[in-house]
Image (cartoon, rainbow, N blue to C red):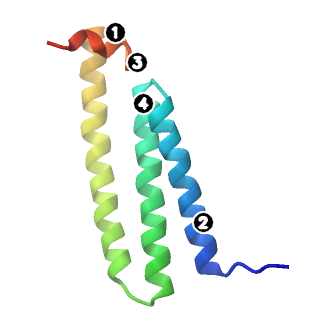
Amino acid sequence: MFYIDHSSFVQILAAFLFCIGLLIVIFRRNLIVMLMGVELLLNAANLSLIGFSHHFSMIDGQIQAFFVITLAAAESAIGLSILVNLYRHIGSINTSDTQLMKG
């Protein structure tokens, strides 16, 4: 039987969440779902930072995770405002419809 310690499990979980978020961003065409995928990527990075911080008994990873959370909040606010403006002008939030805005 093989044993996975707590630190390795957290990193495997973070990698799994990161892969799911990356697949969402690559294959989905709805911009709201893509923003949720980016949030999943950032949360996976936070989980990895906090896991390493706990494993090495240092607070640096937790401080960096706090800044990533701040960045994610700003990204959500700006991204949703862009989506609302895009929906007002085009009437859709699919990435295939935004090709019309090329100039």
- Specify whether 46 is left or right of 98: right
From the top left corner, tell me how far across and down residue 99 is, in percent.
29, 14
Q: CA distance from mark 1 to mark 2?
A: 40 Å
Q: Which residue is mark 3?
A: 94
Q: Secondary structure at mark 4?
A: helix
| Marks 4 and 1, the one that precedes in the sequence | 4
Disc number placed over residue 12 in the picture, else none = 2
Disc number placed over residue 45 in the picture, else none = none
Camera-side residue of 57 and 3: 3
- Specify whether 84 is left or right of 36: left
Q: CA distance from mark 4 to mark 1?
A: 14 Å
Q: CA distance from mark 4 to mark 3?
A: 9 Å
* Discs 4/3, front: 3
Q: Residues within 10 Å of mark 3 (few under 14, many from 20)?
A: some
Q: Residues within 10 Å of mark 1 (few under 14, many from 20)?
A: few
Disc number placed over residue 91 in the picture, else none = 1
Q: Secondary structure at mark 3?
A: loop
Q: CA distance from mark 4 to mark 2?
A: 27 Å
From the top left corner, tell me how far across and down residue 74 is, in percent.
25, 48
Question: Can you name the residue that lies furthest to the right here?
Answer: 1
Q: CA distance from mark 3 to mark 1?
A: 9 Å
* Discs 3/1, front: 3
Check disc 3 and give the amino acid type: Asn
Q: Residues within 10 Å of mark 2 (few under 14, many from 20)?
A: some
Q: CA distance from mark 3 to mark 2?
A: 32 Å
| Marks 4 and 2, the one that precedes in the sequence | 2
Q: Secondary structure at mark 2?
A: helix
Residue 65 vertical position relative to residue 59 in the rendered view, above or below: above
Residue 7 vertical position relative to residue 85 in the rendered view, above or below: below
Residue occupying image coordinates x 43% and y 34%: 34
Residue occupying image coordinates x 76% and y 80%: 3
Q: Which residue is mark 4?
A: 32
